[in-house]
Image (cartoon, rainbow, N blue to C red):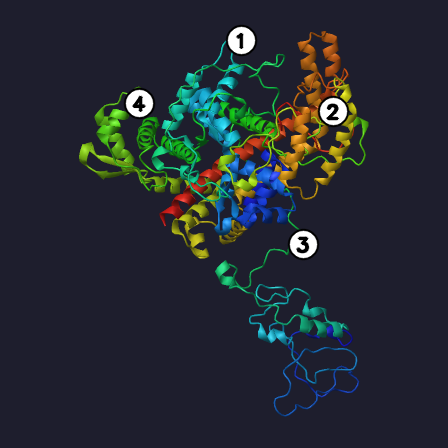
Amino acid sequence: MTQAEIKLCSLLLQEHFGEIVEKIGVHLIRTGSQPLRVIAHDTRTSPDQVKKALCVLIQHNLVTYQVHKRGTVEYEAQCSRVLRMLRYPRYIYTAKTLYSDTGELIVEELLLNGKMTMSALVKRVADRLTETMEDGKTMDYAEVSSTFVRLADTHFVQRCPLVSPTENSEPGPPQPAPTLVINENDMYLVPKLSLIGKGKRRRSSEDDATGEPKAKRLKHSTDNKEPIPDDGIYWQANLDRFHQHFRDQAIVSAVANRMDQTSSEIVRTMLRMSEITTPSSAPFTQPLSSNEIFRSLPTGYNISKQVLDQYLTLLADDPLEFVGKSGDSGGGMYVINLHKVLGSLATATLESVVQERFGSRCARIFRLVLQKKHLEQKQVEDFAMIPAKEAKDMLYKMLSENFMLLQSIANLIERRQFETKENKRLLEKSQRVEAIIASMQATGAEEAQLQEIEEMITAPERQQIETLKRNVNKLDASEIQVDETIFLLESYIESNTKRQ
Amino acid sequence: MGNNGAWLILQPRLPPLVAPTPGSGWLRPPPPRLPGGGPPRRLLLDWRGGLTNGELAEAGPERPLLEEDGRIPGWRRPRLRVGEGRQVFLIGSLNTQAASTMASRGRGRGRGQLTFNMEAVGIGKGDALPPPTLQPSPLFPPLEFRPVPLPSGEEGEYVLALKQELRGAMRQLPYFIRPAVPKRDVERYSDKYQMSGPIDSAIDWNPDWRRLPRELRIRVRKLQKERTTILLPKRPPKTTEDKEETIQKLETLEKKEEEVTSEEDEEKEEEEKEEEEEEEYDEEEHEEETDYIMSYFDNGEDFGVDSDDNMDEAIY
């Protein structure tokens, strides 16, 4: 783990789970697998706090445990999984685009809670959706369930490993920790539940049994008297599937930029057909025949078979080699060269970074060096047609520049936290004033009173708040943007290392 | 001519020595050459009293002058050049500072050697290096080119708002563990009005214990059972009991700073639970015979201390 990665993990854990969880999490990331008492000793935290933190981390799939000989349990943190927390908004937004608000909330609840049973999830999402609907309308459990089933069928959510059932029947002392197993075939198997009901609105004035007071309380499943039909079957978001989707999106938009809309639609169709059949680390998709592709095109596209064949030939002949032809049966068998695509995307990303940072001349040198892989300085001058002195200057600049994108995200987060802390007093004041105004409006206050309260915040303070909001938004947006770049480069690195 | 012998070195080749004419006072006649080759040519230092090294060395600019210069190839000019690495002084500045110059001779020894091959990096011999860096690079160096604009538009805005909303939401969930508020030394009147955070070692949510190692098992705090320090006027016979209980609890909580196992806690919790089982109160409305809403109370002790329990809005 690089220092930058550890720093970023620390910031993310701290923002989402607080300092105690951060301390334990970062310690595990640094030191690797450790048992409970060693963690408590090394971090100088009380064992109870460590237990709390570990419960949270395990619940959110950030830490796993293993039973070693003599019964000791050791805990290990997954640093890369912690870094995924940066991408949560992107996952949720993707679910929204594919399965609308219901899908969005399902994925959001799963990410916020780590893992949930289907019944609990459906109930919670139905309640949340009902909150947003007009008075009198409620969201039916059946609708939420059907969206959930679709998410499972397309592998966006998957089952968590189950507690091995043989344990209870074993004689002898109970195990220190359960073993968790999952069968590949069962990973997306939705239990047959008949969830009947509708979402309930939160009623703050009544002592409604199902209504929840403001935040900070989770419904205890033990409060329900009915047995839970899918007890023990937990679900989590399948991040790899989302990554596959991002990759597909990147490919389609690359093709659209390079060629035209129709080509990109064809490529999108091919990718969609390969979604479930091709593992994400494969070098290329399963071969698809031109006939199959023709049949699977979206209904809006009225291109004839010949035109499709022409497009496919064009795509296969393109020097970038995104699409390859692997045979002639069925009207021509075509594949998408995933590794090649990822390589080209990563290259393009790096080139554009260099270009924006150092100018087009540097970008030219960079492209050359990437191509030839090894150039002597003199050759660089000759090829790039740049005077020697300038070329040397640029080489030196690029060499000394720090391309740690992770470090830059950590900086962004720190800066944002700093800005917020600086203006904490102001922010609190403005929020309090807003709350007062809102409550007064609710109870019907006069215009003059509202005016008076609004004036509690002076004009320069307002200005400061505005600037602060703008800066924080900018920093947040930058984080998101840098994470996208990281994703592209990471995908390429991953595909390369797996190949070897 | 004579008085400033320092510049002797930079002068062109001296005319062949002639026997000094009386009255010139410039140079002593060189001592006879010792057999065996004699010492290597040395720097000619001039100060009153004549030569030190016993021989006159012609000091042309193209000749290595100092002892260690002999080891460094290609030393041509008195300025710093790549490959020599000596930056300290110009040879021409020798004066009566003979001692220091002699001393720096030793210091400069071997400084010209670098650990990597310069040609590979692309710095040829005789090139001028960029000026030495005398301070750390600026924190915010000016950008050469304008940065590319951030994603805007519907998607960008939505994802941004989502991110900020998530941040706020996560802080409200029970998974967010706040460090314990430091214990007070004396029981204070305002304690009754304070909303204390989770100060014991319970957790606020209910994990599936079957999935977790047994050693992690801690008691789960039941909802709405946290307010152990509030005295209820509805139960007058219990008032004194509660008060003692409160003091006792404060003491036990202080003791909890050290190693407390979960079993001990469980016992105490059971005690508390039995006391509180019949208590059902909404924290906002029934707590005290006061008209003040708890969340508005601020005794000023949090001023300057980070505490953002009350933020309902989106968190920045």
Disc 4 vs disc 3: which is toward the camera?
4
**Residue A401 appears in the picture as rendered:** no
Q: Disc 3 vs disc 2: Cβ atoms closer than 8 Å?
A: no
| Mark number, residue A135 | 1
Identify the residue under disc 3: B134
Report which residue position mark 2 lands on: B230
Residue at coordinates 76% horizontally, 72% vertically from top-left? B97
Front label number (3 vs 1): 1
Q: For the residues labelled 4 and 3, say whether their Cβ atoms are less than 8 Å apart.
A: no
Three-letter amino acid code at disc 1? Answer: Asp
Give the SS element for disc 2. loop
Say if A306 sits above or below A356 in the image: above
Specify whether residue A107 is in view. Answer: yes
Q: Amino acid at mark 4?
A: Pro
User: Residue type at mark 3?
Assistant: Leu
Q: Disc 1 is attached to a residue of which chain?
A: A
C-alpha distance separating marks 1 and 4: 38 Å
Name the subunit of mark 2.
Answer: B
- In depth, the one of B45 and B72 nearer the eye is B72
**Amino acid type of the residue that numbered disc 2 sits on in the rendered structure:** Ile
User: On residue A298, which mark appears?
Assistant: 4
Q: Is residue A86 left or right of residue B315?
A: left
